[in-house]
Image (cartoon, rainbow, N blue to C red):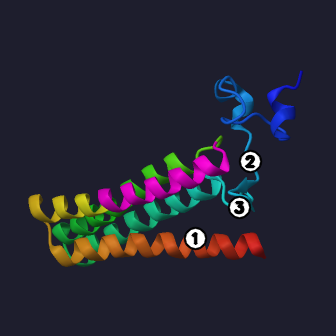
Amino acid sequence: MKTYLQACNKTAPCFTCSPIAALSESHYTRRNSVYGVKVSRFVTLKDVSRIVYLQFVLMAIAAFITFLLVDKQAGLSVFLGALACWVPTFLFARLVFADGYSARVFLTLFVVGEALRLFLSATLFVLVVKYLPVRVLPVFAGFAGTLFAFWLASLFLLIKKKG
């Protein structure tokens, strides 16, 4: 009698082979293809955590510098704008890049997580501008700066991994 490992010819169980496999620890072993295309785990949760941490540090520095150079309200505005971008990114990173997903589940979580991140970012931005005593330009600068920090840190990670 063939086991589900032999039936699907994979090194670890998957959802399609056995419902019991979804409950076992070996379910967390990754697949190496999505719809027949070979993929590898290029970015890990540790890498994404570094990017998100760097984002937070840069946003705090930018808010502090704005606080010192301009005034308290501008510094708070920059911080809240940056927070409106950072919180959804942090939640996205924790959801999508947690260890243990197969490639198909990872792809699905990535798409859904990105849509939720965009929606939450826009909602937080509007709430900050509409209901808090902030200046719009510094809020936008903090938001854009945090988003730029994410792209820049991602680019550095890509260059480091390839080099």
Residue closest to the eye, 69 or 18: 18
Amino acid carrying label 2: it is Arg
Name the amino acid type tagged 1.
Ser
Q: Position of residue 148 (x, y in %)?
A: 44, 76
Q: Residue at x 33, y 67 (%)?
A: 64
Q: Nearer the viewer, mark 3 or mark 1?
A: 3
Graded by Cα atoms within 10 Å as few (under 14), some (14 to 19) or many (20 or more), the crowding at tag 1 reads: some
Q: Quadrant of residue 87?
A: bottom left
Dot label at residue 42: 3
Classify 133 as above or below 153. above
What residue is disc 1 on? 154
Q: Are marks 1 and 2 in contact (CB under 8 Å)?
A: no
Hey, which quadrant is residue 141 in on the image? bottom left
Question: Mark 3 to mark 1: distance in Å?
Answer: 12 Å
Q: In the rendered structure, does residue 64 fall within the stretch colored magenta? A: no
Numbered disc in front, either 2 or 3: 2
Q: Which mark is residue 37?
A: none
